Amino acid sequence: MTDSISRETIDSDEMDPDFVDKIVEAGADRIRTCIQCGTCSSVCPSGRRTAFRTRELMRKALLGLKDEVLSSPDLWLCATCLTCLERCPRQIKVTDAIVIMRNMAVKEGYMLPQHRKVSQKLIQTGHAVPIDEANQEMRKELGLQEIPPTVHSHKDALKDVKRIMEETGFNDLVEGAEMEKDSK
Amino acid sequence: MAKKPQFMHFLGCIIPHRYPSIESAVKLVFEDLGMELLDMEGASCCPAPGVFGSFDRVTWASVSARNLTIAEAAGVPITTGCNGCFASLWDANYELKHDKELRKSVNENLAEIGREFKGTIEVTHYVDALYSTAGLEKIKKHVVRPLKGVRMALHPGCHWMRPKAIKKKDDSENPHIFRELCEVSGAEYVPYRDELICCGAGGAVRTADVKVALEFTKQKFESILEAGGADIIVTPCPFCELQLDLGQVEIQKHFGDEFNFDIMHVVELLALAFGHEPEEFGLDTHLQYAMRKNQPNWERLGIKTEG
């Protein structure tokens, strides 16, 4: 031991130079202008109580630490309230950047089990929060149509919604995420 | 006589399936104001922007675009009472009008079901229909039961007015439209420090980690108490309403703190102010009352019900 300072060097193998290009291409076009001022973190209501640090996430994205960013569950602690985006002095679309990275994470197979579940509800019923029996009863009592005039009462419409999700590959994406998780 | 303003009524999930009292209340309020709500037959989930938009943008935009085409076929603007649905439909409509590549892939998906996004209609929120189409002057004329002496905190939520540079609805850092609309009810506006922070439910956070989401909500409640407390909290969003309403029961369960606010959607507040009885639209069907087996605080609201 000659030195009490711990040197943490980022291994260049972990850096993916294309990562930030992809984020820029997908719409967060000003991310490279980030000056690491920390406004995003300081106004973040999630960061106030969790380990989620927006500024750090932006820095890691710029460094190209793709695997570290995409595999982190912290990526899912942003409530997309858009406050950071409103206040960023560089007018970076911070929230858009986070959503873009979430899309990439899901493609890589990182999806929380509870998010997979809500996706399956959408795939099966056309609604993230479908109707239940208690609610049907409540609707009747209020004099509303027991089943709303939505996909819930139009089978053909539901078929169309399902067809779209087959076409976009969403079904496979959700199931793929499941396989990924099972194999871990 | 001028033709009644018409809107395609986008229901979404939380209003019809968890807080149907909002659906009943908006029908009463819009009818009183001479605005027509048309059923949007076959509409689906918007789909939730922070959730499905976070999973796969093209799927989110395609499902949302299908909803938009229902209104395009009718040639009537959409209105929705949910900030989340508004964010999905408004954003998808905007992005599809400005992003050719996205529009191309979305329309390829829609072609499979014989539809096409054309970009011919506008998406509005109940707040827009009330504030801009009906107008405050007209709304004031319908207030026959001003909620005098009721202390009212507001939770405008995030996605109606942000991002301000794109949505151009209100100054999201210093908003006034939602406040002015709610103040027409005669209730007393109670400003508090954390009025503009998120309820915690959005962005798939409630689904990912309900305790983190509830901590946002608890911070809001504590901030309201620091400002002297409030009787009601009014919001323009059913998902925020769920988080603030059912959230009180969940906060008590997870953290032990007890809060007792009556939560109202702005159309529920206006229905009361317009003289409708709470049982006409089911104010007492809110989930916190079902879970706690209690009732809204009628006395505090200045509303006497029979019995």
Image: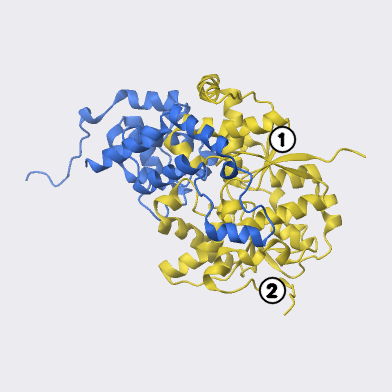
Chain colours: A blue, B yellow
Q: Residue furthest bottom?
A: B307
Give residue B76's position: percent from left, percent from top: 73, 34
Residue where numbered disc 2 is placed: B298
**Left or right of A63 in this view: B286:** right
Tell me which residue sits at (52%, 49%) in the image: A130
Tell me: residue B149, above or below residue B181. Answer: below
Q: Which mark is residue B77?
A: 1
User: Of A65 and B234, which appears nearest the observer?
Assistant: B234
User: Of B77 and A31, which appears nearest the observer?
Assistant: B77
Amino acid on which disc 1 is placed: Pro
Q: Residues within 10 Å of mark 1 (few under 14, many from 20)?
A: some
Secondary structure of residue under mark 2: helix
* Chain where mark 1 sits: B
Q: Residue furthest front?
A: A155
Q: Earlier in the sequence, mark 2 or mark 1?
A: 1
Residue A68 falls in image quadrant: top left
Tell me which residue sits at (36%, 33%) in the image: A172
Residue A19 falls in image quadrant: top left
**Left or right of B186 in this view: A183:** left
User: Of B188 and B307, which appears nearest the observer?
Assistant: B307
Amino acid on which disc 2 is placed: Trp
